[in-house]
Image: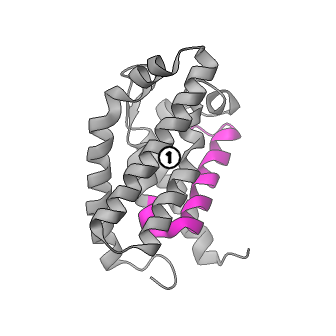
Amino acid sequence: MKLSTRELIICSLFASITAILSQIAIPVTTVPFTMQIFGVMLCGMLLGEKLGFISQVIYLLLGAIGMPVFAEMSGGLGIIFGPTGGFILSFPIVTYIVGRFSNQYKSKIILILGMVLGLVVSYLIGTIQFCFITKASFISGIMMCVTPFIIFDLLKIVLAYSLGSIVYKRVSLVVGI
């Protein structure tokens, strides 16, 4: 797969946007409240599955080598393989799902349902890793990692869709859009 210079720059830009949004963090429980999922949803909607996926892999790799791109200016493999790392590991997958829905369906409702599906995948991967690391039960993991965030994450989806729709209409980020 060969990427143009423009596509590489766009992927890097969206990895940076995710990193910036990660710094908007409020430590509520073991899993901090951040704007990461907003960035991930926006990325998938605007870049599609291929470039969206690549942008989030770049974000993960930057964090893996120790760059402070994760919540609360953290980075490193300890974060990725720690209790909340499953949520971060889910970002490329979530972006792929949202990007796929964005490319295949032009219906507002279908795209938002794709975003909700991506959120469920993130919750599932994140909660499974949290339970595995902390030895908590799955129900306990859901109560700690999902329940406090559902309303806020659904609002972030609506915000990502709203902002993404405006940007999508005004800027051609990828050839063919």
Left or right: where does residue 135 sit relative to residue 172? right
**Rendered view: 138 above or below 95:** above
Q: Is residue 124 above or below residue 16?
A: above
Q: Quadrant of residue 89?
A: top right
Q: Quadrant of residue 52?
A: bottom right
Residue occupying the point 34% across, 64% down: 110
Residue linked to disc 1:
19
Q: Is residue 5 magenta?
A: no
Q: Secondary structure at mark 1?
A: helix
Residue 162 can be seen, yes or no: yes
Looking at the picture, does residue 161 appear above or below residue 156?
below
* Residue in the picture at 40% in, 30% down: 146
Q: Is residue 3 left or right of residue 152?
A: right
- The magenta-colored residue range is 43-68
Q: Is disc 1 surrounded by few (<14), some (14 to 19) or many (20+) residues within 10 Å?
A: many
The extreme bottom residue here reads: 176
Out of 87 and 112, give the one closest to the viewer: 112
Report the side of 172 relative to 15 (left or right).
left
Q: Amino acid at mark 1?
A: Ala
x then y, percent, for residue 86: 58, 35
Residue 63, position as x, y percentages in the image: 63, 41
User: What residue do we see at 59% from left, 59% from top?
Assistant: 53
